[in-house]
Image (cartoon, helix red, strand yellow):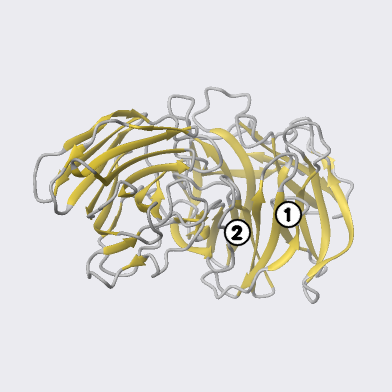
């Protein structure tokens, strides 16, 4: 065996709540997608070092229109049994306290690429469902349980489990409360593994912020009682303010053919120590079983490691390639995501003008229903993104351009629009924690195709424009502090959008290309 040193995270940018699985010779990681579609991104690897975006699973199975910011698709869990992949996920419809409407579903497929079955509704008592296939043939569904009676803001009350009957496609028998959680609280993300004579319950605790952690307990009987790891938490950065990886938790484990075990978990890399613009990312570390039967990090302690070793069959170099380009010469590339609705030919038209994406306008940038935006994850602290656009607005309510978008409360939008006195102009709009500022400068621009660019260097960014085929880039507005594009459940996205508040589908923009160049090492 060889030992390959890698740097965490292995999945850069918005890739939270990783669930790792090995089937045959392939490792898979599924991550949460929240309000972005298609949902549940799947990465695959042959060596645990380099990962490729393989597919996204949820398409027509879900309707996310109107779902709240930070809701929708949470904590997917992949398992494999009976010749089928099983995917469990939560669709969160409301997060307004004291309640939480979180519906859990199960779908199956003979291949990771589908076709996937229609969703089977499981329950709604709490989020983060997982499915365990026991050696006796029984199947068990676990989930966090939400108790609205609790006086704390977070009302996670522990982990419950119930038998699942595949022939009836429903839960049967009693509900078992198998873990109340520790004083870290906010217990969620349950996964059961069988090793030796024990069932091991791996959970996330402490919330998804600074106190996030992995806690483990075990039992010789699957329904409990469960014994708490005496040295919990087995992974956390909650007491390590100088760690380059923060908010570490939500772990799942996998065994290699050589008998080694690894844990995938989420983490953040806060910019300037305070702003996780890239969102929650995925890291990996080797773990081992102690003689007394507990799981520990190789190397000792319980700290997340930004540099770690992976055992490989041959020497492998960890690759970093976050660049992305779409010239719109064929189908939309699978890296794209949309908000709450899929990119279909009703508003993403690749036929009307060959070589261009014709994007039909949607509702306003605040819309939770028909927001027409195509975007990719920001994966680098430093990057440049450029697009070329042909747009001829005739009203101030029409706009199209280049956007940095965290959520409907926090975004930066450089766009082409119409001014009654100046005609076609470029403007800059910022929303920071729901407070919007429309910068007063209106840049009059001549007709024709135009390029828009954003240059991002860590905490600051600058928008530019130029008329196509000209050499000189002109600034759009002042340099922008980007630290507000952080927080919440998702990471920042970079993309293109078209809006029209005068008329539904009232205008369109033609995009010639979109190019993202990552500049991090």
Q: Is residue 318 visible?
A: yes
Relative to the observer, which residue lies in front, 103 or 476?
A: 476
Residue that mark 1 sits on: 193
- Residue at the farthest left position: 470
Classify 10 Å Cα crowding around label 1: few (below 14), some (14-19), many (20 and above).
some
- Residue 6, percent from left and from top: 44, 42
Which part of the image, by quadrant, shows the C terminus? top left
- Residue 177, percent from left and from top: 86, 48
Residue under the point 79% across and 61% down: 140
Classify 10 Å Cα crowding around label 2: few (below 14), some (14-19), many (20 and above).
many
Tag 2 and tag 1, C-beta contact below 8 Å: no
Residue that mark 2 sits on: 21
Q: Earlier in the sequence, mark 2 or mark 1?
A: 2
Residue under the point 60% across and 33% down: 209
Please tell me in which quadrant of the rendered image residue 214 appears: top right
Q: Is residue 486 above or below residue 11?
A: above
- Residue at the farthest front position: 420
């Amino acid at each position: 065996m060889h030992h390959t040193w890698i740097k965490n995270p292995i999945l850069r940018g918005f890739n939270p709540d990783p669930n790792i699985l090995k089937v045959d010779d392939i490792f898979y990681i599924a991550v949460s997608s929240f309000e972005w579609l298609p949902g549940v991104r799947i990465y695959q690897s042959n060596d645990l070092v380099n990962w490729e975006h393989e597919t996204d699973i949820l398409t027509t199975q879900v309707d996310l229109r109107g779902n709240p910011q930070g809701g929708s698709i949470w904590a997917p869990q992949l398992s494999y049994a009976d010749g089928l992949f099983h995917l469990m996920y939560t669709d969160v419809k409301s997060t307004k306290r004291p309640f939480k409407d979180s519906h859990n579903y199960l779908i199956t497929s003979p291949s990771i690429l589908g076709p996937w079955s229609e969703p089977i509704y499981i329950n709604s008592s709490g989020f983060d469902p997982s499915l365990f296939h026991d050696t006796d043939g029984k199947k068990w569904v676990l989930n966090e349980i939400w108790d609205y009676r609790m006086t704390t803001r977070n009302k996670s009350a522990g982990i419950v489990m119930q038998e699942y009957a595949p022939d009836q496609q429903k839960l049967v028998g009693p509900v078992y409360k198998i873990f109340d959680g520790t004083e870290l609280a906010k217990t969620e993300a349950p996964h059961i593994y069988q090793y030796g004579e024990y069932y091991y319950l791996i959970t996330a605790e402490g919330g998804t912020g600074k106190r996030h952690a992995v806690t483990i307990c075990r039992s010789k009987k699957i329904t409990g009682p469960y014994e708490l790891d005496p040295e919990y938490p087995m992974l956390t950065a909650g007491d390590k303010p100088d760690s380059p990886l923060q908010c570490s938790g939500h772990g799942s484990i996998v065994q290699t053919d050589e008998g080694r075990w690894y844990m995938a978990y989420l983490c953040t890399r806060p910019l300037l120590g305070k702003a996780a613009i890239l969102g929650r990312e995925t890291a990996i570390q080797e773990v081992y079983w102690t003689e007394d039967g507990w799981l520990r990090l190789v190397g000792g302690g319980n700290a997340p490691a930004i540099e770690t070793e992976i055992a490989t069959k041959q020497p492998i170099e960890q690759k970093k390639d976050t660049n992305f380009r779409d010239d719109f010469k064929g189908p939309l590339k699978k890296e794209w995501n949309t908000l709450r609705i899929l990119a279909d030919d009703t508003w993403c038209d690749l036929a009307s003008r060959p070589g261009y994406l014709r994007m039909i306008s949607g509702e306003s940038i605040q819309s939770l229903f028909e927001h027409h935006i195509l975007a990719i994850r920001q994966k680098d602290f430093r990057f440049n993104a450029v697009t070329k656009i042909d747009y001829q607005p005739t009203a101030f309510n029409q706009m199209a351009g280049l956007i940095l978008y965290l959520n409907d409360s926090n975004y930066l939008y450089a766009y082409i629009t119409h001014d009654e006195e100046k005609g076609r102009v470029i403007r800059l709009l910022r929303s920071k924690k729901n407070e919007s500022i429309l910068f007063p400068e209106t840049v009059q621009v001549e007709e024709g195709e135009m390029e828009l660019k954003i240059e991002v260097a860590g905490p600051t960014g600058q928008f530019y424009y130029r008329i196509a085929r000209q050499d000189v880039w002109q600034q759009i507005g002042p340099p922008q502090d980007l630290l507000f594009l952080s927080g919440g459940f998702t990471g920042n996205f970079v993309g293109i959008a078209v809006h029209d508040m005068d008329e539904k589908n009232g205008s369109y923009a033609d995009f010639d290309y979109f190019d993202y160049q990552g500049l991090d090492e």
